[in-house]
């Protein structure tokens, strides 16, 4: 599972994830085209948003995803 797939499922959808980090859903959707990688400029903000919501996502998950 790519980082984008993992985070999208944890947040409950792409739009919810995008809203949590104040990004356009279309822009976040394009991350799927980068082999599912989350841009480094967003990783810290996404991790903090996940923790604020009580989601169990680690920095490792955001960078590497899960097998």
Image: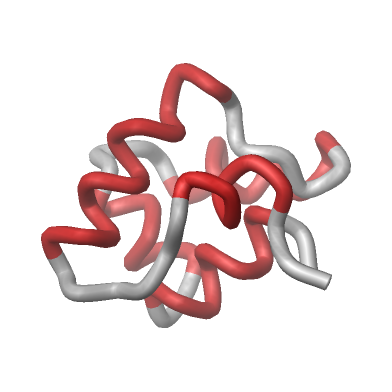
Residue at position x 40%, y 40% from top? 24
Q: Is residue 2 left or right of residue 46?
A: right
Judge by depth and name the residue closer to the eye, 13 or 43: 43
32, above or below 67, in the image: above
Residue at position x 53%, y 68% from top? 8
Residue at position x 45%, y 34% from top? 43
Which image quadrant for residue 40? top right
Q: Percent position (x, y) of residue 53? A: 16, 69
Q: Is residue 62 left or right of residue 21?
A: right
15, above or below 10, in the image: above
Q: Percent position (x, y) of residue 27? A: 55, 36
Which image quadrant for residue 6? bottom right
User: What sort of colour scheme is used for the picture?
Assistant: secondary structure
Judge by depth and name the residue closer to the eye, 26 or 9: 9
Q: What is the quadrant of the C terminus in the image? A: bottom right
36, above or below 40, in the image: below
Q: Report how many numbered discs are placed on residues in the image.
A: 0
Residue at position x 59%, y 56% from top? 61
Q: What is the quadrant of the N terminus in the image? A: bottom right
From this viewpoint, which residue is outermost toward the top? 41
Q: Percent position (x, y) of residue 15? A: 40, 63
Q: Is residue 1 left or right of residue 6?
A: right
């Amino acid at each position: 599972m790519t980082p984008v797939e993992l985070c999208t499922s944890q947040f409950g959808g792409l739009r919810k994830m995008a809203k949590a980090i104040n990004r356009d859903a279309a822009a976040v959707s394009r991350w799927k085209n980068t082999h599912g990688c989350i841009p480094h400029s967003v990783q810290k903000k996404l991790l903090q948003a996940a923790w604020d919501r009580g989601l169990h996502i680690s920095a490792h998950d955001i960078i590497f995803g899960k097998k």
